[in-house]
Image (tube, rainbow, N blue to C red):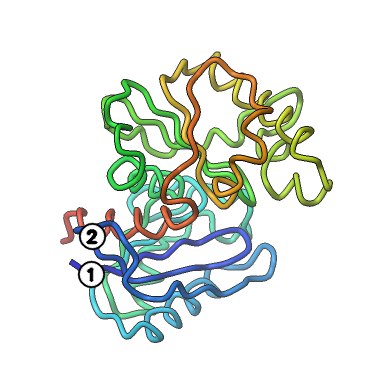
Amino acid sequence: MITLGIDIGGSAIKGALVDLDQGKLVSERVRYETEPLFKPRVAAELVEKIRKKLDYHGVIGVGYPGVVKKGIAYTAANLHKNWIGTDIAQLLSTQTGQPVIVINDADAAGLAEMRFGIEDAHLYKTVFFLTVGTGIGSAIFVDGHLLPNTELGHLEVRGKEAEHRASDAVRRQKKLSWKRWGKRFTEVLNTYESLINPDLFIIGGGISSKFENYAEYLKIQTKILPAELENLAGIIGAAMAAKEAELP
């Protein structure tokens, strides 16, 4: 089954057609940069632009960077405050003329990685998946089952939210070496270790493709692996969520 997956990020909106039998993109990945703190209407217009460009008709899966329940946004950490309370599913459905399913973006990426990424991820009792980019997103799986909307990138670590201390955006803005950034990220991982005690960390997002640059600087007890799907996981997972949702 071919389904359109959309990944709404803090600095861009991306989308592609996904073959959900193989967990692979079967179209170009369309990407549109956004202004900081863009509003919901801008996202709706860009999602429709992606849909038209890919000539797609059918259910659309969307990953949103915040807490989302029944299609409604409850938080908007890296977006405009107007997102809070917005029925994203309804907004995008009205704009595109297609049914829309919305899921937390890190949850979407984690679902894709657990199914199509690291081969033996399902063998671990507790898996802690992280997306590291503009912010830090989290998804926790116990016996393969997702605990939705954890959003632990906002957990305080030494007086700052984790994503304000050790996101990839912070690394680039502060021009941190991999060693210095690795030390910051280790503090974040140690905090998660002490709270959750996972059996495996998986590092996703754009920074996963650079894993060899910082792996040696991560001093933690838990096994840690880079995501196999890298930054495509959000699109694939959003498409998965759309396919598997029980539409009215």
| Tags 2 and 1 touching, CB below 8 Å | yes
Numbered label tally: 2
**Looking at the image, which is closer to me, 223 or 74?**
223
**Which residue corresponds to the image point at 73% horizontal and 30% vertical from the top-left?**
184
Q: Please state which of residues 225 and 90 is positioned toward the viewer in this rendering.
A: 225
| Dot 2 crowding, Cα within 10 Å, few <14, some 14–19, many 20+ | some
Q: Is residue 9 above or below residue 230?
A: below
Horizontal side of 160 relative to 68 (left or right) equals: right
Q: Which residue is mark 2?
A: 20
> What residue appears at the point 53 percent right and 49 percent down from the top-left corner?
205
Q: Is residue 71 left or right of residue 163?
A: left
Q: Vertical placement of 198 versus 106: above or below?
A: above
Q: Which mark is residue 2?
A: 1
Q: Position of residue 223 (x, y in %)?
A: 48, 22
> Looking at numbered disc 1 in the image, what kind of residue is underneath it?
Ile
Reply above or below: 35 against 162.
below
| 177 left or right of 150 in image | right
How packed mark 1 is, by other alpha carbons closer than 10 Å (few <14, some 14-19, many 20 or more), is some
SS for callout 2: loop
Q: Give residue 81's position: percent from left, percent from top.
A: 62, 57
Quarter of the rendering containing residue 102: bottom left
Find residue 93 and report its horizontal and vertical position in percent.
Answer: 33, 72
- What label sits on residue 22 in the rendered view? none
**Foreground residue, 216 or 93?**
216
x and y percent of residue 12 in the render? 58, 66
